[in-house]
Amino acid sequence: MSSPTTWPASFEAILRRYLAALSVDEDIPAEPLLDLGLDSLRATALLADLEREFGVDFGDEVLDPALFSSTGHMWAVVQELMDDPLSRAPQ
């Protein structure tokens, strides 16, 4: 289960739960997550799981279609949120 971008196993495990079109042993391709079976309900649950796991808050400023353009982009956004004290989820 390698990926072109390095991210933690917990990120990939959460993501794989919501990508219906991806088999267990298949690498995550660099294509829009919507093309991999992510619908609006799954996207909402995915973001909630990522917020809990990484202690971030996806504010309105990052919630746009670009967030779902690829796994690499989504991970980059999560990293940015983790580095920004104002984007940390309330304790």
Image (cartoon, rainbow, N blue to C red):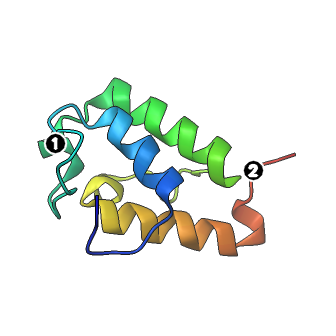
18 relative to 12, above or below: above
Secondary element under disc 1, as helix, strand or loop, is helix
Question: Seen in the image, is 23 located left or right of residue 55?
Answer: left
Q: Residues within 10 Å of mark 2 (few under 14, many from 20)?
A: some
Q: Which residue is mark 2?
A: 89
Q: Which residue is mark 1?
A: 36
Rendering coords of residue 23 (x, y %): 17, 38
Rendering coords of residue 5 (x, y %): 33, 75
Question: Seen in the image, is 41 located left or right of residue 9?
Answer: left
Q: Quadrant of the C terminus?
A: top right
Q: Amino acid at mark 2?
A: Ala
Secondary element under disc 2, as helix, strand or loop, is loop
Residue farthest to the right, as pictured? 91
Q: Name which residue lies at 70% across and 73% down.
A: 84
66 relative to 57, above or below: below
Q: Nearer the viewer, residue 89 or 9?
A: 9
Q: Amino acid at mark 1?
A: Leu
